C-alpha cells in the first residue's frame, strides 16, 4: 500500500497554492506535514482525500490512479482542527455513522464502536451528544469516527490546535499508539515542530506551497537539507548569521565572535544556523564559544527560560534550562554549543553539521 | 462582607419603568379597564364583570375568525418555511451573486405593508390587473373580490411574496455559519446530499428556524394591513381574520367593551402559542 503524489500542482485563480510536488507515502507510516499556516498543508490533504482536485498531476494509491475518483468512493477518513461531529447524534451514533452508510450489520457496528470507544476513553459517554462533551472529548469522538472505519488513509488536519494545553499533551501522547498496529497511511498536519518530534515517523517540511524536504523525522530535524527546512523545523525560530571560514577559524560577519572547529569544509563564506537550545546561559558540550548579548525580552516558563538578545545586528533567541532571571537591557554572557551548529553554503544548502 | 446601602440604582431603573409603563402597561390596563365595562361615550362607564369575555368566547363570529386565522397561519408557515429553506439552499455562497441575491431578497421586506396590499390589489384585479387578467385569459374563472377561494389564494400568495424572504435570510445566515469542514467530513463518510441536509444543515439551522417560525407565526397571526387593503376581509367574511374583525368591532361598531375583551383573549392566545412553540423547540437546549 502506498500513496503517491506525482507532480501535483494546485492553482486557484492566479494564485498557486501548491507548487509541483512529488511525495511517496508508504504503508504503516505516520507522516507529518510541518509548516506554518498557508504553507499548503490543508490543500495537500484535501487533494490526498479527493475533496479537492489538483490543477495538474496525478495521485496514485496502491498502484491505481485515483486522481478523479470521488471522495465517497475512496476509503479515507479525516479529522479537523474544529471538532466536527453530527450535532444531533449521540457519541455512539456519531462513531457508527461511517459504518451505517456502508451498510455494516448492527451487531458488528456495536462491537467495532465499543472497541474504538474504549481505545479513546469514550465508553462512558456513548449516549451523550457532542455539545454535552468537553472539547477534548469532542475531538476524541471525531478521532473515533476516523478510526472505526479501517480506512486506508487517515488524515489529521491540526487535530490538537483547538485543544487547551493539558488536553493537547495528553492526546498527543496517545496518538502514535492509536495508529501503531493499523494497516494504513496516516498523514498529520501541524504547525508545531514539537508535534512532529513527538509523533515521529516521517516529516515533510512545507513552506508557501512547496514541500522542502521529506524523510525520517529525526533525520529531517538533525540534517535539514537546507536553511528553509531548518527554519520550518525550529521553534523558537532558528538563529542565523553569515560567517566566514579561514583555516580552523570561523568568524561571524557582524561581530567578532569566533571559534575553532575542525569541520571539513573549504575556506569561504557560509551561513550558520543555531537552534535556540544550543545557546545557553551556561556552558554545554565540550566546545563552546562565548557571545555577549543585551537582553531584549526574557520569558520564564518554569522549566525553561527563553531569552531574546541582541549582539550588533544580530537579533537572537536562546533557550536555557531552569529559571535564568535576566533583566531587560542587561548585558549578559551566553554560550553557544559549537558542535551543534548547522553550516549552510551561500545558496542555503546544508554543508555539514557539528 | 459589609452590605452597603446605595439607592442610586433607582435613578437608572426609573426611566425604564416609566418607558415600559407608557408604552405597555398603561395602554394594556386601559384595554383591561374597557373589557369589564360598558360605555356609550361621553366618558360614562358601567361595570359589566366578565360578561364580554363570556360573550366573546361563546360567539360564533369569534370562533370563525379565530378558525380562519389558524388556517391562514398554518398554511403560511407550511409554505414559507420549506420554500424559504429551499431558496436559501440554492443561493450562492460567494461571488457577485451574494449581494445581488441578498438585495433582491430584502426588497419585499422593505415595502410598507399597505403599499403591498395596494400593489396586490391592483395586480390581482380581474379586469385590468396583470395577474387577474392573465389568469382569466388563461381560462381560469378568477375574481378575488367575489370568490372566497380566489380571495384566500391571493392573500396567501401576497403573504408568501412579502414574507418568504425573511425565512430565506434567516436560513441563509444559519447555513453560512456552518463550517466547510462539516460538509467535507460528511462527504468523506460517504453521505449524500439529503443526509447532509438532514443531519448537518437542519440541526445547525435549528436556532434560526425557531426564530423564523416564531416571527412568522406572530406576524401572520396578527396580520391586518395587507388583507385590509387587499380584500377588506371579504368577500363576505371569507378573509375576515382576527385583527380585521377586532377593528371592525372596535371602530366600526364602537363596541369598546367586547372589542377590549376580544383583544385580551387574542393577546393571550398569541402569548400562549409563542410560549408553547418556544419551549417545545428549545427543549433540548437547556442542557448546554
Image: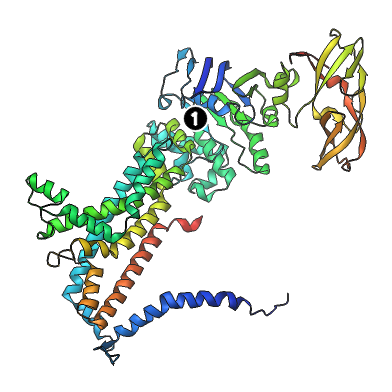
B260 or A188: which is nearer to us?
B260
Left or right of A136, for residue B147: left
B265 or A345: which is nearer to us?
A345
* Residue furthest out toward the top: A266
Instruction: Using the rendered image of the protein, determine whether residue A286 is visible from the camera's viewpoint.
Output: no
Look at the numbered disc 1 and give the secondary structure of its residue: strand
Q: Which part of the image, by quadrant, shows the N terminus of chain B?
A: bottom right
Compared with B258, B177 (above or below) is above
Residue A266 lies in quadrant: top right
**Which percent across, then down, holds residue B2?**
73, 77
Residue A299 lies in quadrant: top right
B37 or A265: which is nearer to us?
B37
Question: The numbered mark 1 sits on a residue in which chain?
Answer: A
For label 1, the crowd category at 10 Å Cα-Cα, with few meaning under 14, some 14 to 19 and many 20 or more, is many
Colour pattern: rainbow
Residue A295 lies in quadrant: top right
**Count of picture labels:** 1
A312 or A203: which is nearer to us?
A312
Compared with B170, A59 (above or below) is above
Instruction: Using the rendered image of the protein, determine whether residue B37 is visible from the camera's viewpoint.
Output: yes
**Which percent across, then down, holds residue A74?**
44, 24
Q: Residue at x 48, y 44 (%)?
A: A91
Q: Residue at x 47, y 25 (%)?
A: A52
**Which percent across, then down, holds residue A168?**
65, 39
Q: Residue at x 22, y 63 (%)?
A: B229
Left or right of A144, for residue B137: left
Q: What residue did someone put label 1 on? A: A77
Q: Residue at x 36, y 41 (%)?
A: B89
Left or right of A140, for residue B57: left
Left or right of A307, for residue B242: left
**Which percent across, then down, holds residue A62?**
49, 15
Compared with B164, A210 (above or below) is above
Amino acid at each position: 500500500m502506498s500513496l503517491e503524489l506525482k507532480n501535483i500542482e494546485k492553482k486557484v485563480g492566479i494564485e498557486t497554492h501548491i507548487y509541483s510536488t512529488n511525495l511517496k507515502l508508504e504503508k504503516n507510516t505516520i507522516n507529518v506535514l510541518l509548516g506554518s499556516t498557508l504553507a499548503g498543508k490543508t490543500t495537500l490533504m484535501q487533494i490526498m482525500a479527493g475533496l479537492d482536485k489538483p490543477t495538474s498531476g496525478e495521485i496514485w494509491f496502491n498502484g491505481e490512479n485515483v486522481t478523479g475518483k470521488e471522495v465517497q468512493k475512496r476509503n479515507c477518513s479525516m479529522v479537523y482542527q474544529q471538532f466536527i461531529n453530527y450535532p444531533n447524534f449521540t457519541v455512539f451514533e456519531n462513531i457508527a455513522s461511517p459504518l451505517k452508510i456502508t451498510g455494516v450489520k448492527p451487531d458488528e457496528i456495536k462491537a467495532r464502536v465499543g472497541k474504538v470507544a474504549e481505545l479513546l476513553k469514550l465508553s462512558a459517554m456513548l449516549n451523550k451528544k457532542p455539545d454535552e462533551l468537553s472539547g477534548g472529548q469532542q475531538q476524541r469522538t471525531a478521532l473515533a469516527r476516523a478510526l472505526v472505519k479501517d480506512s486506508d488513509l487517515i488524515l489529521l488536519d491540526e487535530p490538537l490546535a483547538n485543544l487547551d494545553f493539558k488536553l493537547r499533551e495528553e492526546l498527543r501522547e496517545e496518538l502514535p499508539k492509536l495508529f501503531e498496529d493499523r494497516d494504513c497511511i496516516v498523514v498529520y498536519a501541524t504547525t508545531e515542530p514539537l508535534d512532529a518530534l513527538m509523533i515521529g515517523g516521517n516529516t515533510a517540511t512545507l513552506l508557501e506551497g512547496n514541500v522542502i524536504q521529506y524523510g525520517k523525522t529525526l533525520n529531517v530535524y538533525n540534517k535539514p537539507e537546507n536553511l528553509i527546512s531548518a527554519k520550518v523545523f525550529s521553534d523558537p525560530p532558528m538563529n542565523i548569521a553569515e560567517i566566514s571560514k579561514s583555516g580552523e577559524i570561523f568568524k561571524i560577519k557582524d561581530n567578532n565572535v569566533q571559534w575553532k572547529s575542525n569541520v571539513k569544509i573549504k575556506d569561504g563564506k557560509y551561513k550558520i544556523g543555531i537552534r535556540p537550545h544550543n545557546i545557553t546561559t551556561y556552558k554545554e558540550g565540550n566546545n563552546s564559544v562565548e557571545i555577549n548579548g543585551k537582553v531584549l525580552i526574557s520569558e520564564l516558563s518554569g522549566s525553561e527560560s527563553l531569552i531574546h538578545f541582541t549582539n550588533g545586528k544580530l537579533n537572537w533567541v536562546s533557550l536555557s534550562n531552569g529559571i535564568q532571571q535576566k533583566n531587560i537591557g542587561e548585558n549578559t554572557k551566553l554560550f553557544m554549543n559549537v558542535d551543534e551548529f548547522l553550516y549552510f553554503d551561500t545558496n542555503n544548502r546544508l554543508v555539514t553539521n557539528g | 462582607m459589609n452590605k452597603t446601602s446605595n439607592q442610586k440604582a433607582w435613578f437608572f431603573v426609573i426611566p425604564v419603568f416609566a418607558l415600559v409603563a407608557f408604552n405597555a402597561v398603561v395602554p394594556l390596563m386601559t384595554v383591561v379597564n374597557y373589557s369589564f365595562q360598558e360605555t356609550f361615550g361621553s366618558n360614562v362607564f358601567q361595570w359589566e364583570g366578565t360578561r364580554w369575555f363570556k360573550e366573546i368566547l361563546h360567539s360564533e363570529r369569534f370562533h370563525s375568525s379565530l378558525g380562519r386565522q389558524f388556517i391562514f397561519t398554518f398554511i403560511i408557515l407550511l409554505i414559507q418555511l420549506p420554500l424559504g429553506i429551499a431558496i436559501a439552499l440554492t443561493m450562492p455562497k460567494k461571488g457577485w451573486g451574494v449581494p445581488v441575491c441578498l438585495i433582491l431578497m430584502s426588497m419585499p421586506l422593505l415595502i410598507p405593508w399597505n403599499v403591498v396590499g395596494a400593489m396586490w390589489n391592483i395586480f390581482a384585479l380581474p379586469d385590468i390587473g396583470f395577474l387577474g387578467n392573465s389568469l382569466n385569459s388563461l381560462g381560469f374563472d378568477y375574481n378575488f373580490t367575489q370568490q372566497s377561494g380566489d380571495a384566500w389564494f391571493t392573500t396567501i400568495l401576497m403573504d408568501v411574496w412579502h414574507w418568504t424572504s425573511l425565512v430565506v435570510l434567516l436560513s441563509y445566515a444559519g447555513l453560512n455559519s456552518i463550517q466547510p469542514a462539516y460538509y467535507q467530513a460528511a462527504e468523506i463518510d460517504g453521505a449524500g446530499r439529503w443526509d447532509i441536509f438532514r443531519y448537518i444543515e437542519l440541526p445547525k439551522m435549528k436556532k434560526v428556524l425557531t426564530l423564523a417560525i416564531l416571527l412568522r407565526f406572530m406576524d401572520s397571526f396578527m396580520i391586518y394591513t395587507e388583507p385590509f387593503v387587499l380584500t377588506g376581509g371579504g368577500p363576505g367574511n371569507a378573509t375576515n381574520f382576527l385583527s380585521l374583525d377586532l377593528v371592525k368591532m372596535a371602530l366600526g361598531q364602537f363596541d369598546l367593551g367586547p372589542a377590549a375583551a376580544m383583544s385580551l383573549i387574542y393577546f393571550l392566545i398569541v402569548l400562549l402559542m409563542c410560549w408553547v412553540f418556544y419551549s417545545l423547540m428549545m427543549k433540548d437546549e437547556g442542557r448546554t
